[in-house]
């Protein structure tokens, strides 16, 4: 299958190429985001792969359909950037990432909590500037504190310490 992949970065190209080795799709990578002006790049492609900042509105979808596109796949769980009604009317299927790794996101949450508690973000910037002063960097211990995590879905319940 011919797939036009929009809004790509180097890491996208590397990971897609690695995974695609098993499938053999013909992938074309485009750095610009998908918009009505760039939709012409997808002419002749059965599928497009988009990301969160791509503009997949009715006008863009009309152009994709006219160029032969039949599948829009977003590499995100959210799909609010895609006009689903226009896609359905024009016979284009839409696919998305069903979920992100709850463990990865919950571990990142713990990392942010530790960063705030220990002022790591401020300390990092100071060290880069060769400033090793400790004033304003006094953090706090998390031990003995109660930390609230909003949400009890897959991510919230995966946060360590729950």
Image (tube, rainbow, N blue to C red):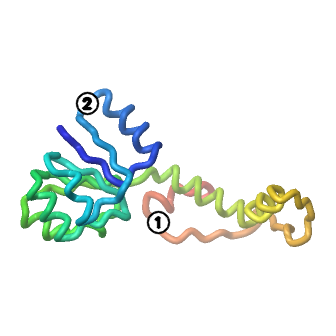
Percent from the top left, x then y, of residue 103? 51, 50
Residue at 26%, 59% (x, y): give it. Answer: 38
Residue at 30%, 48% (x, y): give it. Answer: 5
Percent from the top left, x then y, of residue 63? 14, 62
Q: Which mark is residue 23?
A: 2
Residue at 25%, 30% (x, y): give it. Answer: 23
Quadrant of the image containing the C terminus: bottom right
User: Which residue is labeled 1 in the image?
Assistant: 152
Residue at 10%, 51% (x, y): give it. Answer: 68
Q: Secondary structure at mark 1?
A: loop
Percent from the top left, x then y, of residue 138? 86, 68
Choose between 57 and 92: the one closer to the eye. Answer: 57
Task: Tell me how far mark 2 sits from mark 1, CA to CA.
Answer: 37 Å
Reply above or below: 49 against 26: below
Residue 3: tell me if it is visible: yes
- Label 2 packing within 10 angstroms: few (<14), some (14-19), many (20+): few
Q: Secondary structure at mark 2?
A: loop
Reply above or below: 3 against 112: above
Q: Quadrant of residue 143?
A: bottom right
Q: Residue furthest top?
A: 22
Residue 153 relative to residue 40: left or right: right
Reply above or below: 122 against 93: below
Choose between 28 and 80: the one closer to the eye. Answer: 28
Residue 143: tell me if it is visible: no
Select label 2 or label 1 by which is in front: 2
Percent from the top left, x then y, of residue 12? 41, 44
């Amino acid at each position: 299958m011919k797939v036009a992949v929009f809004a790509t970065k180097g890491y996208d190209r590397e990971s897609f190429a690695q995974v695609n080795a098993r499938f053999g799709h013909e992938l074309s990578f485009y750095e610009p985001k998908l918009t009505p002006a760039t939709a012409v790049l997808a002419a002749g492609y059965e599928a497009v792969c988009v990301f969160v900042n791509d503009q997949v509105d009715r006008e863009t979808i009309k152009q994709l359909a006219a160029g032969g596109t039949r599948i829009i796949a977003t590499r995100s769980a959210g799909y609010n950037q895609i006009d689903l009604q226009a896609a359905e009317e024009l016979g284009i299927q839409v696919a998305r990432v069903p979920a992100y790794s709850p463990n990865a996101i919950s571990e990142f949450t713990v990392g942010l909590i530790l960063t705030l508690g220990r002022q790591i973000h401020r300390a990092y910037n100071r060290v880069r500037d060769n400033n090793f002063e400790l004033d304003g960097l006094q953090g706090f211990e998390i031990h003995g504190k109660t930390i609230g995590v909003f949400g009890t879905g897959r991510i919230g319940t995966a946060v360590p310490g729950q």
